[in-house]
Image (cartoon, rainbow, N blue to C red):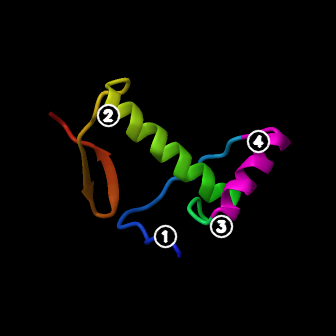
Amino acid sequence: MARPSNNFDSTSLTISVTPQIKVYLEDLTTKGTFGCSAQEAVRFILSKAIDDMLNTGALERRKFKIEGGKVSVADD
């Protein structure tokens, strides 16, 4: 199943991984719950890791606002 489109612009981020990590990411895509590419698997894993850190308090939850399709940190 394709992921839903964003209601706002996405930002590209380039990372480098070892060939071994790329193979593991590709392995995850064969399970069907991590997308259909290594890039989608990374997006899923990163989102889950950040959610976990927010839930444990390792990261402080921020408030965001969306204006004109742009996301920014909301002023408190």
Magenta part of the chain: 16-31
Which of the pair 7/4 is nearer the observer?
Answer: 4
- The residue type indicated by label 1 comes to Arg
Q: Which residue occupies 49% across, 70% down?
A: 3
Q: Say what secondary structure mark 3 lies in.
A: loop
Residue 36 badge: 3
Of circles 2 and 1, the one toward us is 2
Q: Is residue 2 above or below residue 29?
A: below
Q: State the image coordinates of residue 76 (x, y, percent, origin top left).
A: 14, 33
Query: What secondary structure do most residues of the magenta stretch adopt?
Result: helix
Evaluate if marks 2 and 4 touch, with contact meaning CB atoms under 8 Å apart: no
Label 3 – label 2 distance at C-alpha: 27 Å
Q: State the image coordinates of residue 62 (x, y, percent, origin top left).
A: 27, 36
Task: Give the mark nearer the N terminus: 2 vs 1.
Answer: 1
Disc 2 target residue:
55
Disc 4 target residue:
21
Label 2 – label 1 distance at C-alpha: 23 Å
Label 2 – label 4 distance at C-alpha: 26 Å
Q: Say what secondary structure mark 2 lies in.
A: helix
Which of the pair 3/15 is nearer the observer?
Answer: 3
